[in-house]
Structures are given as structure tokens and as C-alpha cells.
Amino acid sequence: MSLDFLSPRPTAQAPARSPMVPGAARAGAVTEIRDGWEVIASFGDPAGEAAACRESVGFADVSPLPKVEVFARPGGEFVAGTATRVGEGWRCPVRPERTLLLGEAVTGAAGITGVRTCDLTGTLAALVVAGPAARETFARFCALDLREAVLPVGGFRPGSVARTPGFLLRDDRDRFLVLFGAAFSEYVWEVVADAAARLGGRPVGADSLPATKTEAARA
């Protein structure tokens, strides 16, 4: 059975909408149409949003990030919990026969033969939580251990995020990407917003997020 009908096919005339737009709109989000998606561009204060990411914590909706699941027979060594950087994307091992491709890593998925793929872009929402207080923010709603010794950059973990099933990837020193079912978007948004606010943080537009080392090197 194919689940392709769950994946968005956005166009300029009928853009896909990030599932976190409704919750963010209540916080003053400004949206734009980009690459066929209605995305959260900012909250009207880019300088303040960037400062939050530098000084405390900022969280941004990045749900349009391409996400493709690849199913194949186990082959070679399986290294649990460690993702591999592919350009500005990631190859994330879930099980020996299951891999989640994110961002630029998705590009090569179409050329893979002998495997089954499923586009999860529309079914998995995504948030980036960034800043020196990012780990403390997660500690308020997530039991996953995010200490450096346990989850270095590139660490990838499935687990409970705000009491919903999800995945967490550390994509830089003070940046974490969390993936979860799109149906829980507004709930997760409110949970993260409450945790961040208690630490002096705030929602930010994706453009205000600090660049990862890989992004900075390619700029």
C-alpha cells in the first residue's frame, strides 16, 4: 500500500501550509510563500529573534524540510544513534532496514534502486530549537539525555517528545532538530513556547536561526 496521498504536492497556486502556522499566528507570525509552502518567515522582530538564539533560546518551524523514509534489506554495519551529514542534510539510521533522509540527503533517494521509499514531508512536522538554553528547554518537556557525552553533534534519537513519539537530531553545538507527527503540531508548539518563555526565549523565523558550521562554510 502506498502512502503517497499523504505527501503534499505544493504549487504556487495551491501552497502547502506548515501545520504550525495556526499556533504561530497567535504569537504574531508573519508568513510568506516559499517554494510552494506557506512558511513562518518572522515574528516582526528579526534582530530580537536572532538575539534570542544567541543569548537564550529560539525555536523555529522548519516543517517544509524534505523528509523521506527509505526501507531496504540490512546491509553493512548499522550504527545506531549516529546520523551522517550529507551536504546540508542528514542520513539518520532508525533501524537496520530503515533510514530517514532529511534535507539535501533526500536528493539521492529517487535514484536508489531495489528499495522502498516514503515521502514523510507532509506527515512529520519539524522544529529547530537553538541557543545556549536549548538543552534546558528540552529538559522541561523531554526525558532524552542531551548531554554532550551522550548526544554529540550528529547524535540521533527516537523517543518521546512532549509525550508524543518523535525523533531528535543534534545538528550543531547548540541546535537541535525535533520531528513529530504533524497532527500534534499545535500542541507541541505550545509546549515548546511555554518552556522557552520561562528561560527568556521566544519563537523565531527560520531566517533568524544561527547557521550550522556546514551552512556557514558553504556561504
Image (tube, rainbow, N blue to C red):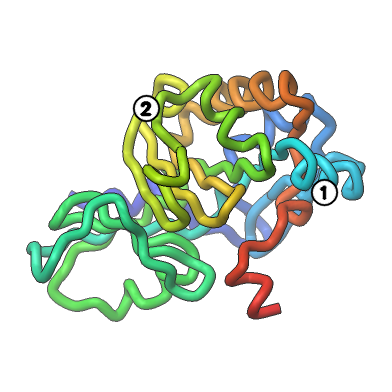
Q: Circle 1 sits on which residue?
A: 50
State yes or no: discs 1 and 2 in contact (Cβ < 8 Å). no
Above or below: residue 52 compared with residue 108? above
- What residue is drawn where x is 63% and y is 70%? 215
Above or below, 92 relative to 168: below
Q: Position of residue 114 (x, y in %)?
A: 13, 74
Which residue is depicted at the point 37% across and 27% down? 160
- State the residue at coordinates (89%, 42%): 48
**Residue kind at label 1, given as amino acid type:** Ala
Image x and y of residue 196, in percent: 69, 27
Dot 1, crowdedness within 10 Å: few (<14), some or many (≥20)?
Answer: many
Q: Quadrant of residue 161?
A: top left
Does residue 72 appear to the left or right of 9 in the view shown?
left
Residue placed farthest to the front in the image? 149
Q: What label does residue 149 carry, if any?
A: none
Q: Which mark is residue 160?
A: 2
Left or right of 166, for residue 54: right
Of the pair 1 and 92, the residue shown nearer to us:
92
Q: Give the percent coordinates (x, y) of residue 90.
A: 42, 63
* Quarter of the figure that contains the C terminus: bottom right
**Which secondary structure lies at badge 1?**
helix
